[in-house]
Image (cartoon, rainbow, N blue to C red):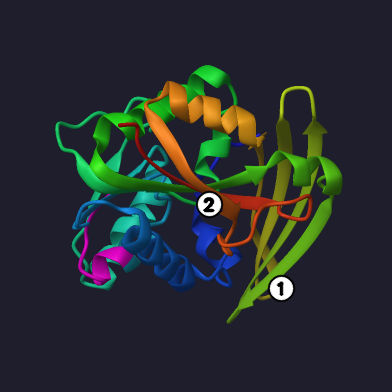
Amino acid sequence: MNPVFGKDYSSSYDLLYEEKDYDGECDLIEKIIKKYSKIPVHSILDLGCGTGNHSIRLAKRGYQVTGVDRSKEMLGIAKAKADQNKVTCTLLPSDIREFSRPEKYDAIIMMFAVLGYQQDNDDVLAVLETVSKHLKKGGVFICDLWYGPAVLAQKPGERVRVIENRDTKIIRVSSGLLDSFRHLVTVHFHLWTIKGERMVAETQEDHTMRFFFPQELSLFFKCSGLTIQRMGAFPDIGTDPGEETWNICTISLLRE
């Protein structure tokens, strides 16, 4: 089994998620900043930035963006895209549990369920402490994650995705195994890349994701010096989450 976000999966990542509304999510980030931040926002720290789909767009909008990811393959793609788009943003390799810089940032984002990759309580707290350490007073922290009541109600299933781009076809089969006691879903990905009539790559990865419940989130954030201001459906943050809401968004500030 390959490591999470290995070379083959990373190279297919942007095609697999080409329909994701990154522009709309960046609009939402700016809307949240405008409503909740108590300070002007010029600098943004993007923890778990992946291939830079939020970082690059936000840099294009005039923010000073620093993106962090532990996958060198994903960061390499992000850097190539930033150069192609003639966008300046700082991209750093690091495990977000251990990331440490002297700078503090006006806003911090952690998008596409990055917090869910932290399986143990200590890992969750380590990442949230990274946030509290690098967030300016009055600045806002935004993240989306999997919502426990919806995961238990809907349960993970099997999905097949086929993406075609010119002469390349990618087939991805994903299936999820639920561990309700540990609040985890292990998603098994199997990818085939086909060019013309020939399969040129095949890879498999297991992504174990944690899902969260409101009261444990409140406690995690409080222990890390953060106060949740809003917990809403994602991307419709004005709607309260329910058993049909697989993804939610949390908006928080440093505790006074």
Residue 227: image quadrant is: top left
**Residue 55 drawn at (x, y percent):** 33, 58
Q: Is residue 59 magenta?
A: yes
Q: Is residue 3 visible?
A: no
Q: Is residue 55 above or below residue 254?
A: below
Sequence order check: which comes first, mark 1 or mark 2? 2
Q: Amino acid at mark 1?
A: Glu
Which quadrant does the N terminus fall into? top right
Residue at horizontal 76%, vertical 41%?
A: 149
Seen from the viewer's position, the closer of residues 198 and 202 is 202
The residue beneath circle 1 is 197
Residue at horizontal 74%, vertical 51%?
A: 242
Disc 1 vs disc 2: Cβ atoms closer than 8 Å? no
Q: Is residue 149 above or below residue 87?
A: above
Residue 146: image quadrant is: top right
Q: Is residue 223 left or right of residue 232?
A: left
The residue beneath circle 2 is 112
